[in-house]
Each structure stands twice: as structure tokens, then as C-alpha cells.
Amino acid sequence: MVNRNLILGQQVGNTGVVVPPYALGAAPLGNLYQAVADDVAEATLRAALGAGLNYIDTAPHYGFGLSESRVGHFLQGLGAETVGAPLVSTKVGRVLEPIAPSERADVRFGFADTPDLKPVFDYSYSGVMRSFEESCRRLGRENIDIVFAHDLGELTHGDQHKVHWQNFCSGGMHAIQALKAEGRIKAFGLGVNEVEVCQRALVELDVDLFLLAGRYTLLEQTPLQTLFPACQRRGVAVVAAGPFNSGILAGTLDYGQIYYNYAPAPDDVVRHARAIKAVCDEYAVPLPAAALQFPLAHPQVVSVLAGFASAEQVNSAKRWVNTDIPQEFWRQLRNTGLIDPSAPTPTE
């Protein structure tokens, strides 16, 4: 997958990590919402590397170790001598515990046909260390390029947020610092869906980058006036994940259940998306193409990360990224108020 402006990717601060412009989110390979066969998962990963998605993001939570195990099996099959081996990130903040037979279900926490394990939040020093070591085992690696603290934030944890934040600041963050000092982690950040917790992290934690899902997309530009300027001042990069906003920007918007932010989309959000789609239709621009290209235009965004469950989806994304989109299209979105007027667009 070739991005005309960022063929070689961008370096994250002084970490030595160079992040390519587009990345594969491996949550679907953990059987997100539906089971994916092992051979389909492997074909997806192979297609991703062939298309230039040379960065794979996973997490223990994705299929309760299944996503990491599949990524690890694939990477080990490439061999250590592989030129241009992919960048890998995973996450800490949950440990996996065995479930009782009574807890078995076809779908648990949004994942189907999973191992008999369950995720338990643990942001302590020992929890982060355990999570990291178990991820290394599943991935078949001694070191991991990027590690994100997963799903910190008040919207996620409610009245437990203060406890989890304190546990991470007083415990888990020290584990991250120790792992970085040992050279086992190159870069660290938060992997979250919330802008506010990123702003707090800029003040209280030593972060290199954020993986921010769903908050900077063609549909929503929440961080523009607050988080992104603060990141620029601190030299902190952003990986814009979830560019399709849980699917609303990837489909036809004409039928079936429409999802936004991991739930059925509110009517006002659907109307907004359909208005963007109307402009897409006017200029013969595929909606997913605009969704994938838009976030990368912001100078703070070093990579756009999307989840794919098949080689066919990866190949579609390759076409969308390389679709020529006229400047007039972006201008109309801005002039009609469908995107923030201060948002950079790919033709600028």
C-alpha cells in the first residue's frame, strides 16, 4: 500500500521507531463479533504485508490471546532473516484468567469462539509485567516495538477510573520504564478511545505516542483544537485508529444495522454520515477511500490503523488508499460544515 506523501513513514520522536502510514489492526483476527478461520487470518496478514501495511497492532484482549497467537505464528513463519519485518505493537492493562465452565458462551466481550480465558483489568506493576511477558510468549518475541496502556479513561471505567489511573501511575508506568530501560520496549503510549485521558497523560506520564481510536476521523475531529496542539508542543505522535468509526464509514448506509463507536449509531450521526456519502457520490469517491485518506493529512497523525478480517478487505483498502480524490471534494466537505473548517485535507 503506497501513500504518495509518506512512502517511508515517520519517526516517532527520538525512539528510533519509524511508523508506516497505514497499519493493520488485528482485533478482527481475534474473532471480533465472528469467528475467523486460522487460514483466513494468515492470508489476511500475508496480504497486509504484501500491500505495505508493515505495522501490526494487537492486544491480549483481542480474542483473549487468540489475535496475538495468530500474529506470532505468522511472524515466526516469516523467519528472522526476513527483510523489512513488520513493526508490532501490543497492549497492557488486562491480564487473562481462566473461566469457569459456566462462563462459556459463543460470544464474550464481543469476541466469538475464544479460548477459555477472560480479561481482567490490572494496571499494577506486576500486572503490566505479567501482561507483557505473556504477550511476548504468544508473539514469539523477546522485545516488542510499541506497547500501549489499553483502555484507560473515565468513559471506559466510570467510578473505577481513579483507581485504575493511580494503579498505573504508581505501578504499571514503572514497569514500562523498566522495560524501556532494558531495551525491551522502544516506544510507549496509551491505546484509548478518549481524548481527555490523553490530555492528562501528556501532563502526568512520559508518552511517545497515542493510539486514539475513532476520535479523529472523517466523521469526528474532536482532538483538533485541544489534544493535537498539545501533542505538537510535546512532540508526541498520534496513530489514528478506527477510521471507519466502527463501520459507519465503511458501508453503504442504505440498509442493515449501522454501527458507530461500537454501538448502533444515533440518528444524528447517521444523518451526518449520509451527508458525507452524498458528497462522495457527487464526486464518484468511495466513502471508505475518503475515510482512510483524511486522517493522515494532519501533521500530528503518523499512521492510520484499520482492522481487516480477510485478504479481500485488505486489497479493497489498498485500492481506497490509492484512489485519486479531487481537491474540490474536500473543499465542499469543508464549505458545507461536514468537516471541521480547520482540519487539514490530503490535497493541501
Image (cartoon, rainbow, N blue to C red):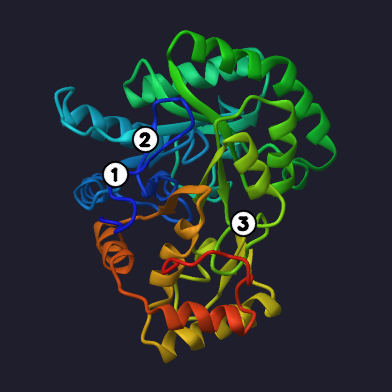
Judge depth for marks 3 and 2 and give the one in front. 2
Look at mark 2 in the image and give the residue it sits on.
18
Sequence-wise first label, 1 or 2: 1
301 lies left or right of 25? right
Type of residue at label 1?
A: Leu
Q: Is residue 59 above or below residue 16?
A: below
The quarter holding residue 18 reads top left
Please tell me whether mark 3 sits on a helix, a strand or a loop. loop
Quote the CA–CA distance across marks 1 and 2: 8 Å
Dot 1, crowdedness within 10 Å: few (<14), some or many (≥20)?
few
Q: Are marks 1 and 2 in contact (CB under 8 Å)?
A: yes
Please give the residue where the numbered disc 1 appears in the rendered image: 8
Q: Residues within 10 Å of mark 3 (few under 14, many from 20)?
A: many
Quarter placement of the C terminus: bottom left
Q: CA distance from mark 3 to mark 2?
A: 23 Å
Relative depth, front residue between 122 and 211: 211
Kindly report the distance in space between the C-alpha atoms of the residues bearing marks 1 and 3: 25 Å
Q: Secondary structure at mark 1?
A: loop
Residue at image mark 3? 215
| Residue 154 as seen in the image, left or right of residue 119 | right
Q: Considering depth in this image, is 299 or 259 the residue closer to the camera?
A: 299
Q: Give how far across and how far down residue 104 sits, in percent.
A: 54, 41
Residue 288: in sight, yes or no?
A: yes
Residue at left offset 70%, top offset 33%: 201
Residue at 43%, 56% (x, y): give it: 34
Residue type, numbered disc 3: Arg
Q: Quadrant of the N terminus?
A: bottom left
Among the two numbered marks 3 and 2 on one chain, the one whose residue lies closer to the N terminus: 2
- Lower sequence index among marks 1 and 3: 1
| Quarter residue 3 falls in | bottom left
Residue for point 55% across, 62% down: 217
Name the kind of residue labelled 2 in the image.
Val
